[in-house]
Image (cartoon, rainbow, N blue to C red):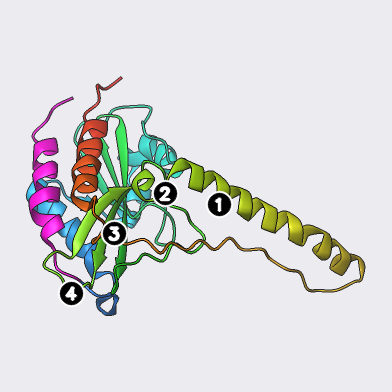
Amino acid sequence: MKTPFLPRLEACLRDRILALPYLPKTQGSAFDLVVRNTIERETNIPCTTSEGWTSQEDYAPFRQAVRKRLDRAPVAAKTPIVVAQPNGSQQWPDLAIIHGNNIAYIEFKTNKDDKIVWNGGLPRRDGFYLFNSGLKARKQTTAFLGHHVLPDPDRALLEQAAKAASAAAAPFNDRLKNAGSSWNHYARAMFNCSAYYLRHPDAQFRENEAIAFLIHHLGRMTR
């Protein structure tokens, strides 16, 4: 499905968003807001707020699909839809784009250093990430897919480690409960990565592949 929206979105990502300077978190969600406003301006598609997304009946067929993180909706959208924080401010993703019945998700990351704090959430394999960094360099924004930064073998080991940590805590929580204690140990998954993103030798390749993947995904034939 080809419409003027896709080439405009691709040009917007390549020429505008990847050229953005660092927008520190002291300015609130400045990077998120600038990205949304830039996409809206360059594609002529208004960005729907999370409030509008949950209240408008026209979006009902798409809400459940986005809530389940599906890559296709049960029906096709008549016009492209761009929605900010469709599952809430603390839930993935930061942005959803619906074109036809194809759905793509974008997550924003910012840090003053060339590092990303992943905490308890591993990057999604085919998730599209935009990273804005305070690195003192000519380029301060990059894009990549989840599998660019987390290979499948590493993901499998990290997921096994998280499950093992949770399992290890279980017998101690049982003993605490049986002793009548009001305490328990929550084995929270915490993931750290020491890799660089903007300074990675394959950063430009990752950008090109990530944008190509996103545009191809959104342009698939509508069912």
Mark 1 is on which residue type?
Answer: Leu
**What is the CA distance from the residue labelled 1 to the residue labelled 2?**
10 Å
Q: Does 138 appear above or below 160?
A: below
Estimate the x, y position of residue 22 in percent, counting from the top left: 19, 70
Q: Residue reaching furthest bottom?
A: 26
Determine which residue is flagged by label 1. 158
Which residue shows up at 29% across the image and 72% down it?
A: 113
Q: Give the residues drawn in magenta, as a range.
A: 1-22
User: Which residue position is annotated with label 3?
Assistant: 197
For the C terminus, which image quadrant? top left
| Pointer 3 or 2: first along the chain | 2
Mark sitting earlier along the chain (3/1): 1
3D distance between C-alphas at marks 4 and 3: 13 Å
Cα distance, mark 3 to mark 2? 12 Å
Q: Position of residue 83 (x, y in %)?
A: 28, 49
Q: Amino acid at mark 2?
A: Leu
The residue drawn where x is 23% and y is 66% is 31
Instruction: Locate residue 167, reporting x and y percent.
Output: 74, 54
Instruction: Assign the N terminus to one quadrant of the image.
Output: top left
Q: Quadrant of residue 179?
A: bottom right
Q: CA distance from mark 4 to mark 1?
A: 32 Å
Disc nearer the start of the sequence (1/2):
2
| Kind of element beneath mark 2 | loop
The residue wearing badge 4 is: 136
